[in-house]
Image (tube, grey):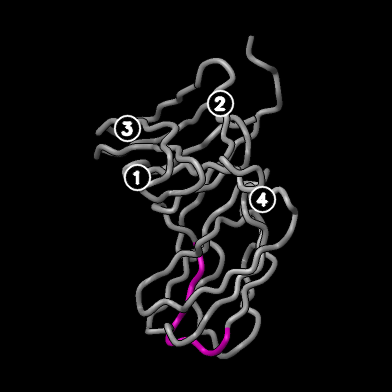
Amino acid sequence: MASTTDIWAVTPVYSATLLRAAATVAGAGDVPLLSYQPLDNGAGYKLFITSVGDSSGMTFTIVGYVVGDLTNTPTTEVMTGPDATAESSANYYSLITSVTASGAGTGNISIGTVVTDGVALPRCRLRGFYFIATAGAGSIALTLDGTAASDRTLLNVATPAIVQSQQMSLPGDGILIAGSAALSSFGVVVNTAAVTSISVFCS
């Protein structure tokens, strides 16, 4: 018999300006964000930094709590500024303490999220999801501990090439998301651009 527990939902938002609207970084120092905890229940995003010009001569130091890390210790990550393209952080953050620039950037710089990075879920059980598809075929995937080709795929669902919404409930206790290392247990849900909206239900 399936266990009865509280259910919580994650509805990720993907926008290049979700955490910081496009603006100049005039010099070294703190880079204020619009939100330091964009999701609840320990879920999180990678930081996606976009620069209009070549800002590869500067760095961004991110301090925050990584999704799935049970040590309750902040992680520090140093990112090289993007060179007129965009760069994603190596880690998924459930809570960001600070973002600091080493110097001035070139052109406007924004910080947000991108659909190809997906959303990271802490150790939990995936119970189901609801999505809205477009006229193009797409997919929804749940991987263990990241989005690299070597990461284990726990679930991969093809979405129809038709504009419609669907809800899928997983049988039994759902899928347990737990990494191989006790201190870094998380899963990543990634949908293609053909899925315009998704809500994931966990416990």
Residue at the front extreme, as displayed: 181
Image-quadrant location for residue 161: top left
Residue found farthest to the right: 72
Q: Residues within 10 Å of mark 1 (few under 14, many from 20)?
A: some
Q: Which residue is mark 2?
A: 127
Q: Amino acid at mark 1?
A: Thr
Q: Which residues are magenta?
A: 102-112
Instruction: Tell me the CA gap for discs 3 and 4.
Output: 32 Å
Q: Which tag, 2 or 4, sits closer to the chain's start?
A: 4
Badge 4 density bin: few <14, some 14–19, many ≥20, Cα 10 Å: many
Residue at 50%, 21% (x, y): give it: 170
Labels 1 and 3 touching (C-beta < 8 A):
yes
The image shows residue 168 at horizontal and vertical percentages of 45, 24
Q: Which residue is mark 4?
A: 69
Q: Could you say which is closer to the camera, residue 80 or residue 103? A: 80
**Element type at marker 1?**
loop
Residue that numbered label 3 is attached to: 159
Mark 2 is surrounded, within 10 Å at the Cα level, by few (under 14), some (14 to 19) or many (20 or more) other residues, namely many
Q: How many marks?
A: 4
> Quadrant of the image for the C terminus?
top right
